[in-house]
Image: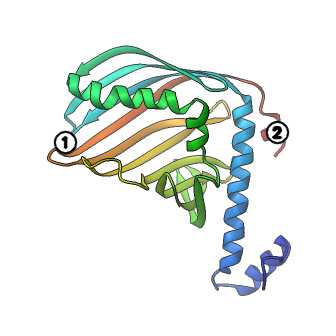
Amino acid sequence: MTRSFTIRQLALTAALAGSMCVPVHAQALRSEQIFAELIDRNRTRAGGLLEYTADRVYRLSDPGGKIHAQIEGRMEFEAPESKTFVTKSEAGSAIGRHLALKPLIASEIDAARGKDRHDSAFTPANYTLELIGEGEVRNHLCYVLRADKYLFEGKVWIDKQDVAMARIEGHPAANLSFWIKRADFVRDYEKVAGFWLPLKDETVVQVRMYGKKILTIGYADYAVRARPLEAESRR
């Protein structure tokens, strides 16, 4: 059996196999198809999203829930690559805000532009995806794929109906610094006006001499302006 088999032949082979495992090359082909469809749908959605605004809460705390630093504000996005953050309030440690939260906000704004945006894009140049099963995220049926390569290692959940990212979890593929021993993160997305936008980020960081810290970003009250997603509605 070779990779020159048609999709129909692969489906027939799987059906005849009954309870046997799907052939490795068929699984690889399915992973490639999902990834290609995800890129295509993302391109369509990106072309339709004109602008959005959303409330943000950036928070640094310890595992017991004690808040060390917090910044609240409003993120404004305008296509194709402009982001602006308007701060509403700040609280807690000035060191935590200036050394952790403010650089995080600045890095997100930088990542939306030019080369940084290309370097972090979810494409085969930055990631490999391997289909490992199916699961559910907030009542959305999803493909579950293992992701790794240059940027992070972990899993992604892709909504089966919209072929859109519903959740990412993992850790950076490379060491962040001498001080940060490990960083594990989870990002959840929600569907807003036909677009899958961030709902919540949580990163658990092990810092030398300081122990475990938790960085969260909460997203709320999206206001979206967009073109009709004609290509999406025909699928």
Display coloring: rainbow
In the rendered image, residue 155, in percent from the top left (x then y), is placed at 50, 58
Q: Of the residues under marks 2 and 1, which one precedes in the sequence?
A: 1
Kind of residue at disc 1: Gly
Residue 20 lies in what quarter of the image?
Answer: bottom right
Identify the mark at residue 227; answer none if there is no mark.
none
Determine if residue 191 is in view. Answer: no
Quarter of the image that includes the N terminus: bottom right
**Residue at 72 percent of width and 69 percent of height:** 29
**Residue at 68 percent of width and 34 percent of height:** 194
In the rendered image, residue 89, in percent from the top left (x then y), is placed at 33, 15
Q: Residue furthest left?
A: 209
In the rendered image, residue 173, in percent from the top left (x then y), is placed at 43, 56
Circles 2, 1 touching at the beta carbon (< 8 Å): no
Viewer-proximal residue among 58 and 173:
173
Is 35 on the left-hand or right-hand side of 107? right
Viewer-proximal residue among 110 and 129:
110
Instruction: Give the residue pinned by disc 2.
Output: 231
Residue 115 lies in what quarter of the image?
Answer: top right
C-alpha separation, residue under disc 2 versus residue under disc 1: 46 Å
**Residue at 35 percent of width and 53 percent of height:** 175
- The answer to whether residue 33 is above or below residue 92 is below
Is 28 on the left-hand or right-hand side of 62? right
Are there few (<14), some (14-19), or many (20+) residues within 10 Å of tag 2?
Answer: few
| SS at badge 1 | loop
Determine if residue 203 is in view. Answer: yes
- The answer to whether residue 88 is above or below residue 15 is above
- The answer to whether residue 145 is above or below residue 48 is below
**Residue at 77 percent of width and 33 percent of height:** 229
Instruction: Give the residue pinned by disc 1.
Output: 64
Kind of residue at disc 2: Ala
